[in-house]
């Protein structure tokens, strides 16, 4: 007999703590740890499910999480970084001849969304944690499915990665006492950059912190574009 088979209506009521996930929902009794989100949901990082994903929760976390492990001259949120990456990724894709960029924009906006439920682990540490990337990938896949996307988009990854690196370079010069040349920063990564070394003009949004509502609206607009184009 399983755990759920033993649950009476009275027992379910006792276990229900008023969260957004109904007490009778089977995932309420998964035998792994969960985190409580801003909307009151329970999210299981080791057993993520698309139904537990919520845009408000993602936006709330990403606007409060600082990039660069906080080692920068001023606050720089993951949400602001993600909006900049999305704009540049679309530019890169159009330079490469892509016409329908709706899915790409949504994927780029959400490229760091797993960090809303996990943490922004510094790359040198992440590479030493053999189980971390699979956990991150599963959470990211659940987020994609929640928004009606495929789990992964290998064909779009190069544009998101190129944009991520270019925004990274901008951030280094904006948030640190440095003026590193773009050629030095990219050196052997030029294959990521369609049209290297041309820097997109009037494309990169300013490094001004976005609010939770602004990030939510950006994702909602991208999602509406995906649906409108039948992507």
Image: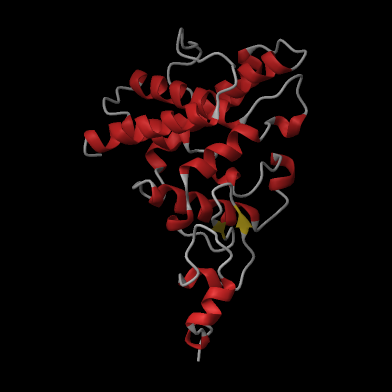
Q: Residue at x 71, y 40 (%)?
A: 122
Query: Residue 32 occupies which quadrant of the picture?
Result: bottom right
Whether 53 is drawn above or below 73: the answer is: below
Residue 75 placement (x, y as % from top left):
70, 24
The residue closer to the viewer here, 72 or 42, is 42
Q: How is the image coloured?
A: secondary structure
Relative to 47, does residue 87 appear above or below in the rendering?
A: above
The outermost residue toward the bottom is: 1
Viewer-proximal residue, 193 or 16? Answer: 16
Please indicate whether residue 191 sits to the left or right of residue 104 in the image.
Answer: right
On-image quarter of the C terminus: top left
Q: Nearer the viewer, residue 79 or 98?
A: 79
Task: Please indicate, yes or no, whether residue 83 appears anywhere in the rendered image.
Answer: yes
Image coordinates of residue 1 in percent, x first then y, are 50, 92
The image quadrant of residue 157 is: top left
Left/right placement of residue 195 relative to residue 36 reads left
Q: Residue at x 59, y 49 (%)?
A: 117
68 relative to 45, above or below: above
Q: Position of residue 131 (x, y in %)?
A: 65, 58
For the point 66% across and 16% down, which residue is it? 184
Task: Determine if residue 158 is in view.
Answer: no
Measuring from the top left, give residue 41's x and y in whole percent.
54, 55
């Amino acid at each position: 007999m399983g755990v759920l088979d033993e649950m009476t209506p009275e027992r379910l009521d006792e276990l229900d703590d008023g969260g957004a996930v109904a007490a009778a929902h089977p995932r309420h009794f998964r035998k792994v740890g969960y985190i409580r989100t801003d909307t009151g949901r329970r999210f299981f990082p080791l057993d993520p499910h698309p139904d537990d994903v919520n845009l408000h929760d993602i936006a709330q976390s990403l606007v409060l999480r600082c990039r660069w492990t906080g080692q920068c001259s001023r606050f720089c949120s993951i949400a602001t970084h993600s909006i900049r990456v999305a704009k540049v990724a679309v530019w890169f894709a159009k330079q490469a001849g892509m016409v329908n960029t709706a899915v790409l924009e949504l994927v780029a906006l959400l490229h760091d969304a797993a960090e809303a439920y996990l943490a922004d682990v510094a790359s040198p540490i992440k590479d030493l944690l053999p189980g971390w990337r699979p956990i991150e990938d599963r959470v990211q896949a659940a987020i994609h499915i929640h928004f009606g996307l495929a789990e992964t988009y290998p064909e779009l990854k190069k544009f998101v990665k190129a944009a991520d690196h270019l925004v990274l370079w901008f951030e280094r010069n904006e948030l640190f006492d440095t003026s590193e040349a773009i050629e030095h920063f990219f050196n052997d990564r030029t294959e990521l950059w369609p049209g290297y070394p041309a820097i997109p003009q009037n494309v990169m949004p300013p490094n001004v912190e976005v609010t939770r509502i602004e990030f939510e609206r950006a994702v909602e607009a991208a999602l509406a574009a995906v649906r409108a184009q039948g992507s």
